[in-house]
Amino acid sequence: MASTLTVRGAPEKAPRRIGRAPLRSPLVAGLGFLLPAIVVYTVFMIYPFANNVYLSLFEWNGLSPDKEFVGLQNYQTLLADPLFWSALKHNVIWAVLGTVLPVAIGLLLAMLLRDQPRGYTVFRAVFFMPQVLAPVVVAIIFSWIYDPTFGILNRLLDDVGLGALAQPWIGDPNTALYALIAVFIWVETGFGFVVFLAALQEVDTDLLDAAEVDCANAWQSFRHVTLPSITNAMTLVVVIQLIAGLNVFDYVWVMTQGGPANSTDLTSTYLYQQAFRETNVGYGAAVATVSTLITLVAAVAVVQLRERRQ
Amino acid sequence: MTAPPARRPRTTRLRRNPVWNILRYVVLFFALAVFAMPLIWMVLAAVKPATELAQDPFAFPHDIELGNLIEAWKVGRYGTYLGNTLFYCLAIVVGVTLLSCLGGYAFGVLEFPGRDALFAVFLIGVVVPFQAVMIPSYYLVSDLGILGTYWAYILPGIAFGLGFGMFMMRAFFRGLPREIASAARLDGANEWQVFRRVMLPMAWPGLITLTIFQFMFTWKTFLLPLVLVQEESKRPISLGITFFFGRYSSDLGMIAAGVTISSLPMVVVYLLLQRRITEGITQGAVKG
C-alpha cells in the first residue's frame, strides 16, 4: 500500500526534480543494457544462421576459395536422397518415443512419490541422477552394457532365464535405433519426473478430497482432477523432450556413428558426416536448414495446439 | 479456529491400502535398480581386478585396485581436460549470466519501442539446435583467427546460452515489484543505478538458478567443442573422454576409470546441491 501511495503522489513532486536526474530516452537506455548481448548474439548466432542458408545454395568442399552457386540444387538432391529420408524417419521415431515414454514413466514415478513416503529423498535423488551426467559418458557406459560379449545386459538376461533374448543390441540394424532410444529414455525420465513431482505438490488437495468423497476412483480423480491441474508442467516437459529428441546427436555419435548400415543415422549425424567427413559443405548446410525448420515447426505446433485446447 | 496450513502431504489411498503400498514399493525399487545399476557397475568395474569383474560384475570387490584410476588419469590427461572444462564452464557461465542479467532487466522492466520483437529474436535461440549453425560457426571462428584458442568455444557458447538466459532473467525481473524501481527513479536514480543498486540485489535467486543451469549445460556439451575445439590440449572432458573411449574401447577397466573420473565431480556437486538444482529446474519450469 505504501509504495502505491508514493507512486500516486509522484506527479506533484516530479517537476522539482527535473534537472537533477536527466531522463535519457527509453530506447537508448534499453539498447544500452542490451548492447553487449546483441553484439555476441548477432555475430555468433544470427550471422551463422543466415550464413547457413546462404551456404546451402552453393556447392563447396570447404577448402577451396571458390564456391559454386547452384541455387536450390542441394534441396532438390535432398528431396531425392533416401539416406536423408531414413535419417528423418529415425528422428521422428526418436522424438515420439523419446517424448511419450519419459513423460509417462516420469509421471508414474512422480505419482508414486507424491505423498512423500519413506525413502522419498533417496528415490528422488537417484531417479534424477542420469540428468547430471554428460550424454557422452552415458553413451560410453551403455556401449559397454550392450556389448555382446562383455556387456551386463545379455548376462543379466541369461541369469533370469531369458538368454534367448540376448542380442548384439547396437550391432544389429533391427534393434540398434531402439537400443539407443532406450538410453535416451533412461536419461530423460528424470527431468519430467522432477517437474511433475513439483507440480503435483501444487494440486489443490481440497479438490482431491472432494473427488474422493464423491466416490471417484483413483483413475477418475487422476484423470479429472490431477491431470488438468498440471497442464502447464505437461506442456513444458513435452516441448522440451520433443526438441531434445529432434536434435539429439551425442548418444548416436559415440555409440554407433549412425551405423550399422545407416540404421541409426539422424539428421544431425548425417549433416555432420556430409559437412566434415565428406566435405559436401553446401549439402550439409541444406540438411541443417531443413531439420532446423522441422524443429521450429514442431515446437510451435505443440504450443499452439495446447493453447487452442485451453 | 482455522486449520493450520496443510503443508504436510495428505494421506493418500496408496498409503492407506497395504496392497497398493507394497505394489508401489515394488515399482519404486525396480526403478531404483534400473537407474542406479549402470552407475554402480561402472564404478565397480573401475576398482575391481579384471578377473574378478568377469566372474561376477556386481559382487562387492574383494580387494580394491586403484591402478586403473591412476593409469587412466595419467594416460587420459584427465587433469588437463577437467581443468579445461572448469575454465570453459566459468567463462561461459560468467558471460551468459552477465549479459542475460543486463538484457533480462531491459526486457522485463524497461519499456522501449521494438522490445518484444527483439525478445522474440532471442527466444528463437532457445529452440535452435547447434547443428543449425554448426557449419558456418566453424568457418566463422576460423576466419576470425580464433580457431585453436579457448575463445573459439567460449564466444559461441555464450551466444548459445543467451536465449534461455534472457528468457529466465526476463521472467525473474518481471516478477519483482515495479513500484520499488519507480520509487528509486523518482528519488533521482538513473536507470543504471536503479538496476545496480535496487533491482540486481533482489535478483540473486534467479541468477543462482541460471548459473546452475548454464554450468550443467556447459559441463555436458559435446557437439560445440567437437566442432570448435581443434587443439588436443584445449579439449574439455566430454570431448577428451570420447577420444579416450575410441582408443581403449576394449579395455573395460580403463574406460570405467575414465568414466568414473569424469563424472565424479558433477555427481558430488549434484549430491551437495541437490535441493537447489531440482528446485532451480522446477522453478524455471513453473516460471515459463
Image (cartoon, coloured by chain):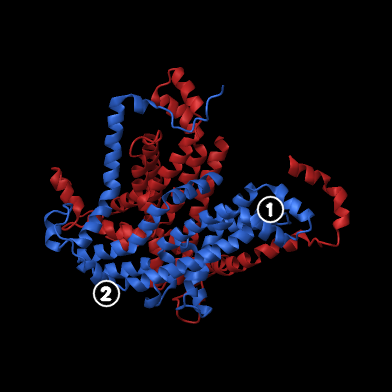
Chain colours: A red, B blue
> Foreground residue, B9 or A193?
B9
Residue at horizontal 42%, vertical 70%?
B227
Residue at horizontal 60%, vertical 50%?
B171
Q: Amino acid at mark 2?
A: Val
Q: Please indicate whether residue B182 sits to the left or right of residue B145 in the image.
A: right
Query: Residue B12: which quarter of the image?
Result: top left
Query: Residue B26: which quarter of the image?
Result: top left
The chain identifier of the residue carrying mark 1 reads B
Q: Position of residue A171 (x, y in %)?
A: 23, 58
Q: Position of residue B91 (x, y in %)?
A: 50, 68
Q: Please indicate whether residue B154 sits to the left or right of residue A9 in the image.
A: left
Q: Amino acid at mark 1?
A: Val
Neighbours of disc 1 within 10 Å: few (<14), some (14-19), many (20+): many
The answer to whether one can see residue A247 in this image is yes
- Please give the residue where the numbered disc 1 appears in the rendered image: B109
- Secondary structure, mark 2, is helix
Name the residue at the front extreme.
B1
Query: Residue A308: which quarter of the image?
Result: top right
Residue at horizontal 37%, vertical 25%?
B13
- Secondary structure, mark 1, is loop
The chain identifier of the residue carrying mark 2 reads B
Neighbours of disc 2 within 10 Å: few (<14), some (14-19), many (20+): few
Q: Please indicate whether residue A194 sits to the left or right of residue A22 in the image.
A: left
Residue B75 circle label: 2
Q: Earlier in the sequence, mark 1 or mark 2?
A: 2
